[in-house]
Image (cartoon, rainbow, N blue to C red):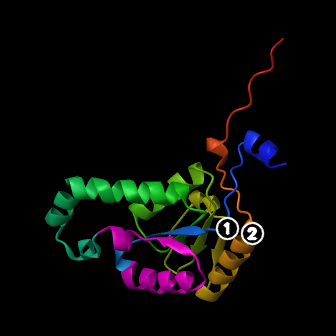
Amino acid sequence: CPGCLQAAGFYPIKRVIMRVYIAASFKHQHAVEMLTDKLEHLNIEVLSWLREGRPEEAFLSRRELEHFILSAEGRRVFKFCADSATKANLVIYLGPSGCDAWAEVGAAYGAGVPIFGLLAKAEEVGLMRHMLECWCVSVEDLLAKVLDLKNRLGPLALQVHPQKRPKPEAPTT
């Protein structure tokens, strides 16, 4: 029953809204733009740091980049990225990327968000590769897996993250 689902911490929404966050380095700006376009053509919402942030950061000097990171704008973009990685239905890691993308992967993993990766030949990752549900070797393979996840969400997506479910009350004796 719908009331039972809500009591258990499941909150139904009226239509499937799949939100994806792409964790990637600024050096992959063009690849992120192309992947975003493909996902949006599949009626998937992309929480885009390129649209929210400043793509020109990739071309800043180290000193200018440090100033941006410490600025109010930098903190705003950080909050957008951290919130998006932990609240999306899926995070896609586009490798090889740097420490910020891996931090987003870790945040998503900790929030219970599934993570798919697009494997690159130069990817250097150790044990933390286990945070990813799957590694895809091509964009076509990745999109097929994304569509499979979207279909598994079904016509009534239940937006639940394990950490956000109400905790059961301790039994009283």
Does the magenta segment cover residue 104? Answer: no
Q: Quadrant of residue 12?
A: bottom right
Question: Disc 1 marks which residue?
Answer: 15
Query: For this view, does 48 lie left or right of residue 139?
Result: left
Looking at numbered disc 1 in the image, what kind of residue is underneath it?
A: Arg
Question: Disc 2 marks which residue?
Answer: 155
Does the magenta segment cover residue 50? Answer: yes
Question: Which contiguous range is marked in magenta?
Answer: 28-53
Q: Say few, some or many: other residues with alpha carbon within 10 Å of mark 2 (under 14 / 14 to 19 / 20 or more).
A: few
Residue 78, can we see it? yes
Q: Quadrant of residue 119?
A: bottom right
Residues 15 and 54: in front is 15
Residues 123 and 12: in front is 12
Query: For this view, does 163 lie left or right of residue 49?
Result: right
Q: Say few, some or many: other residues with alpha carbon within 10 Å of mark 1 (under 14 / 14 to 19 / 20 or more).
A: few
Of the numbered discs 2 and 1, the one sitting upstream in the chain is 1
Cβ atoms under marks 2 and 1 closer than 8 Å: yes
The overriding secondary structure of the stretch rendered in magenta is helix
Looking at numbered disc 2 in the image, what kind of residue is underneath it?
A: Pro
Q: Residue at x 75, y 69 (%)?
A: 155
CA distance for labels 2 and 1: 6 Å
Query: For this view, does 101 lie left or right of residue 76?
Result: right
Q: Mark 1: which secondary structure?
A: loop
Q: Quadrant of residue 51?
A: bottom left
Residue 71 in the image, given as x and y percentages of width and height:
20, 54
Q: Give above or below for 6 relative to 88.
A: above
Q: Residue at x 61, y 63 (%)?
A: 89
Residue 112 in the image, given as x and y percentages of width and height:
63, 52
Q: Residue at x 59, y 54 (%)?
A: 109
Residue 167 in the image, given as x and y percentages of width and height:
69, 33
Residues 152 and 107: in front is 152
